[in-house]
Amino acid sequence: MKRTAAVIAVAIAMLVPAMAKTGGGFMTAGGIGMIQCAVFSNYVAEARAAGINTTNGIQRIDPFISYALGFYTGYNSVADDMWDILAGIRGEQMHISIITMMDGFCQANPTDEVDDALFDTIYKLLPTAQIEPPL
């Protein structure tokens, strides 16, 4: 009996990491990226209602912006032939552009996660990305 319980425990321990992998074949580490899109869109709506460029509005979306900027930095560091994925939207309103792209995805896919919205923005940003470092 103890041997059967041990075998079952080992099988479950081996199964849990496999269940944590995404369809893309990598482990998600958790955090704000695992929030459902519907929840994210609610934060964006609250930020817009408060004034997205005001202190109250920024407080609602700042964790998402910070997470996204870290995601893009990571993307720049590992993607082949990539210098700056954000080159085409850099400027004073870059955070609004990022949130707008993410929210557009999330409005259409409310049961997906924030990470899915970020991956979708990569495809939208690629046409204006800076491939080579500045001379």
Image: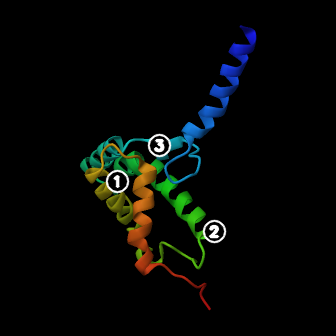
Q: Is residue 84 above or below residue 24?
A: below
Mark 2 and mark 1: Cα distance apart in space = 32 Å
Could you tell which of marks 1 and 3 lies nearer the N-terminus?
3
Task: Decide which of 115, 57 is in the foreground and name it.
Answer: 115
Q: Residues within 10 Å of mark 2 (few under 14, many from 20)?
A: few
Instruction: Please state if 91 lies on the left or on the right of 70 as rendered.
Output: left
Q: Amino acid at mark 3?
A: Met
Query: Which mark lies nearer to you, 1 or 3?
Result: 3
Q: Quadrant of residue 36?
A: top left
On residue 77, the disc is 2
**Left-right relation of 8 to 93:** right
Q: Pick whichever of labels 2 and 1 is earlier in the sequence.
A: 1
- The mark total stands at 3
What residue type is disc 1 on? Thr
Which of discs 2 and 1 lies nearer the camera? The answer is 2
Q: Which three-letter amino acid code belongs to the residue tagged 2? A: Ser
Q: What residue sits 47% from the left and 72% below the top?
A: 86
Q: Which mark is residue 54?
A: 1
* Outermost residue toward the bottom in this view: 135
Please give the residue where the numbered disc 3 appears in the rendered image. Answer: 34
Tell me the element at label 1: loop
Residue 41 point in image, percent of width and height: 31, 47
Distance CA(mark 2)–CA(mark 3): 22 Å
Q: Nearer the viewer, residue 35 or 45?
A: 35
